[in-house]
Amino acid sequence: MFYDRIKNPWLREAADWLVSIGLAVLLFFVVREFVFRTARVDGNSMLPTLEHGDMVILNRFAYVVGTPRVGDIVAFPYAENPSEHYIKRIIAAPGDIVNLREGLFWVNDVMLQDDFSDELVISTGDVVFPIEIDEGHYFVLGDNRNGSQDSRFTKVGTIPANEMIGKATVRIWPLGRIGSVN
């Protein structure tokens, strides 16, 4: 390399260190931008799956090689304040029709059933149901259906795939609850 011409051993060692540190910093930013990122859960909208203060790893690469799927927990910027991120679960994909009847969500005339939410939805939002999901967009809900700002509200709306920061895959904090996120 260029520093092979440096005769002074101290300067050569310093050049080695600078190159190593520079490569490590570059690798860090490449991995952070294109592969993984962390996110902190702020609020109770994803209870019981995720709690306030939980830290998760977002797999950014998942949507480079694939597409979001129903059931994925995703992070995306909040439209009214893009520096804030929301973490929600996808319940409907492009072309699906979402309805809210008698406190229950229906997707393509099939009642949404999940293991974490058995209460009737009281908070209906301001979206007019039924709603057909546009191409490239996804309908997201918090697991805590009555305590979540999500696609039921026009200020959140359906989420374009290209705005998803990544798929939440692993909880890394608190230490006692480390594990995969479903």
Image (spheres, rainbow, N blue to C red):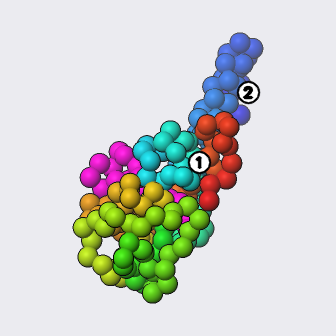
The span from disc 1 to disc 2 (Cα, nearest Å) is: 40 Å
Compare residues 42 and 148 and report the one nearer the observer: 148
CB contact under 8 Å: marks 1 and 2: no
Q: Determine if the magenta segment contains residue 81.
A: yes
In the structure shown, which secondary structural element does the residue marked by tag 2 occupy? Answer: helix
Task: Give the percent coordinates (x, y) of residue 93.
Answer: 47, 76
Quarter holding the N terminus?
A: top right
Tell me the residue that label 1 is attached to: 57
Query: Which residues fall within the magenta stretch?
Result: 71-87
Q: Is residue 101 left or right of residue 109?
A: left
Task: Give the percent coordinates (x, y) of residue 156.
Answer: 32, 61
The reply to whether residue 40 is in sight is no
Q: Amino acid at mark 2?
A: Asp
Compare residues 71 and 122 and report the one nearer the observer: 122
How many marks do you count on the picture? 2
Is 150 located above or below residue 81 in the figure? below
Is 111 located above or below residue 116 in the figure? below
Task: Give the percent coordinates (x, y) of residue 77.
Answer: 38, 53
Compare residues 110 and 2 and report the one nearer the observer: 110
Tell me the residue that label 2 is attached to: 4
Q: Quadrant of residue 139?
A: bottom left
The residue located at (42%, 74%) in the rendering is 104
Please tell me which of labels 1 and 2 falls first in the chain. 2
The reply to whether residue 97 is in sight is yes
Task: Give the percent coordinates (x, y) of residue 82.
Answer: 33, 50
The residue located at (59%, 35%) in the rendering is 25
Q: Amino acid at mark 1?
A: Ile
